[in-house]
Amino acid sequence: MSNLKTVLVVEDEMVLQDVYRMILETGGYAVHTASNGVEGLQQIKTVKPDVVLLDIFMPKMDGKELLRNIDLSEYPGMRVIVYSNLSDKDTESEVLGLGAHQFILKSSLTPNDLLELVRSQEV
């Protein structure tokens, strides 16, 4: 059985999407991407990723709305990490209350931090 984990990056900024994909693929992960919550929801249903990196502010459907629209109990092994440039305790408690496993500040994320963050989700 392969140890390769699947990561879904739900991010509307294409540059970040590409950078995260490159970092994670270099780290040995299979990476899928979505540019908004609607695409992200569809990808979760079809890909069933191990880890979802979820931006909050996106067009069509934001990260909070995606969390409200998915039954996380259907994906017991999936870990959701929400990230944003907005450091806000209310937003953090809200997304954790909606089922996210972690909330991190996007601007503080270095490539190594990103890899470590995803690796730390492995069970």
Image (cartoon, rainbow, N blue to C red):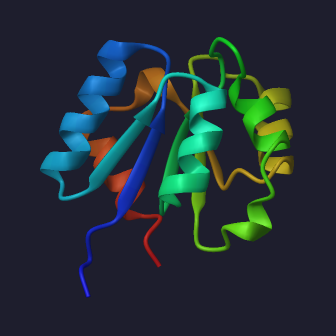
| Relative image position of residue 33 (x, y in whole percent) | 41, 35
Q: Please indicate, yes or no, whether residue 101 appears anywhere in the rendered image.
A: yes
| Relative image position of residue 117 (x, y in whole percent) | 41, 52
Residue shown at 81% from the left, 57% from the top? 71
Q: Taking 40 as reference, is 11 left or right?
A: left
Furthest toward the left, the residue is 26
Which quadrant of the view contains residue 99?
bottom right
Residue shown at 37% from the left, 43% from the top? 32
| Relative image position of residue 105 (x, y in whole percent) | 54, 29
| Relative image position of residue 14 (x, y in whole percent) | 36, 15
Residue shown at 86% from the left, 49% from the top? 97
Q: Please indicate, yes or no, whether residue 80 appears anywhere in the rendered image.
A: no
Residue shown at 38% from the left, 32% from the top? 109
On screen, 12 above or below 9?
above
Total numbered labels? 0
- Image quadrant holding the N terminus, namely bottom left
Q: Nearer the viewer, residue 68 or 96?
A: 68
Q: Nearer the viewer, residue 96 or 37?
A: 37
Which quadrant of the view contains residue 56?
top right
Furthest toward the bottom, the residue is 1
Q: Nearer the viewer, residue 6 or 116?
A: 6
Which quadrant of the view contains residue 88?
top right
On screen, 108 above or below 116?
above
Q: Nearer the viewer, residue 73 or 114?
A: 73
On screen, 24 above or below 11?
below
Q: Taking 98 as reference, is 10 left or right?
A: left
